[in-house]
Image (cartoon, rainbow, N blue to C red):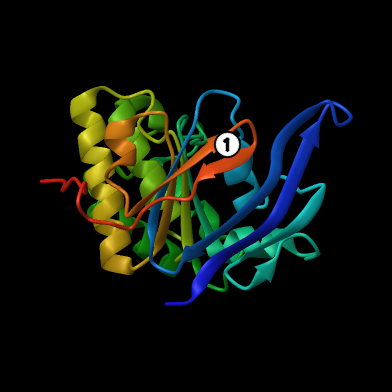
Amino acid sequence: MSNIVEINNLVKSYENGHIKALNGIDLTIEEGEFVSIIGPSGSGKSTLLNMLGALDSPDSGSINVAGYDLSSSKDLNKFRAQKIGFVFQLHNLIPNLSVVENVEIPMFTSKMSNSEMRSKALTLLEGVGLKEKASQKPSKLSGGERQRVAIARALANNPSVILADEPTGSLDSKTSSKILKQLIDLHKKENVTLIIVTHDMNVAKLADRVIEVLDGKLVNAGDKSLENKIVVE
């Protein structure tokens, strides 16, 4: 399999260099792989995820994702619109839009007609079990339902990579299990690369590979052994 992520000597600092969030990261991730990134608060794991999604730029080093050189590309909006699906701990749904309108947002930059966008959004909502709530506002949904809408929205642009930052962090354990199962099922069905940042080892162990970040450095690049793999029922 080819690498969909290639990172070499990635460095990122804040506060005029006083805080080194990433300090020489080297990492490759294969196309279609499911990777979890763990580490204590302030370790740099969320900064790394932001780099992968071109939400922040490095000080030095190179980062290539889905064929885009993010350290030099001038059209990062196009990269995000075409290659990346985001799922955050706080779902970031727009409150004054309906559920189906929220799912349509990533398709606005496509050449699809309004009817095509609506049809696809409804299909995605059906996939996460929320088609019947398409016309409702996010405020009418439970936390778990809002996160399922966020998953549908993340898939709207047929992304090469889904980046999830603590996607179950604000949910109870039962709802968390459902959300994780949907993400993993979609990852397998669509062969989309799934990268999850989490502090929960029960979540992390579901991945093909667990990557550990500490003080801005990669201290464990993960093991692809299936000996400790946990299967979601």
- Residue at 22% x, 25% y is 173
* Residue 202, image x, y percentages: 27, 33
Q: Is residue 102 above or below residue 138?
A: below
Circle 1: residue type: Ser
Instruction: Please state if 105 lies on the left or on the right of 158 as rendered.
Output: right
Answer whether residue 123 is visible to the viewer in this image: no
Tag 1 secondary structure: helix
User: In the image as oriented, which residue stretches furthest toward the bottom?
Assistant: 1
Callout 1: few (<14), some (14-19), or many (20+) C-alpha neighbours within 10 Å? many
User: In the image as oriented, which residue stretches furthest toward the right?
Assistant: 16
Q: Is residue 164 above or below residue 76?
A: above
- Residue at 41% x, 29% y is 199
- Which image quarter is the N terminus in? bottom left
* Residue 55, image x, y percentages: 68, 46
Q: Is residue 131 above or below residue 201?
A: below
Q: Quadrant of residue 201?
A: top left
Label 1 belongs to which residue?
Answer: 46
Instruction: Please state if 103 lies on the left or on the right of 41 as rendered.
Output: left
Answer whether residue 99 is visible to the viewer in this image: yes
The residue nearer to you, when weighing 175 against 60, is: 60
The residue nearer to you, when weighing 181 against 11, is: 11
Q: Is residue 90 above or below residue 8?
A: above
- Residue at 26% x, 32% y is 176
The residue nearer to you, when weighing 170 against 126, is: 170
* Residue 149, image x, y percentages: 36, 43
- Residue at 72% x, 54% y is 9
* Residue 111, image x, y percentages: 57, 73
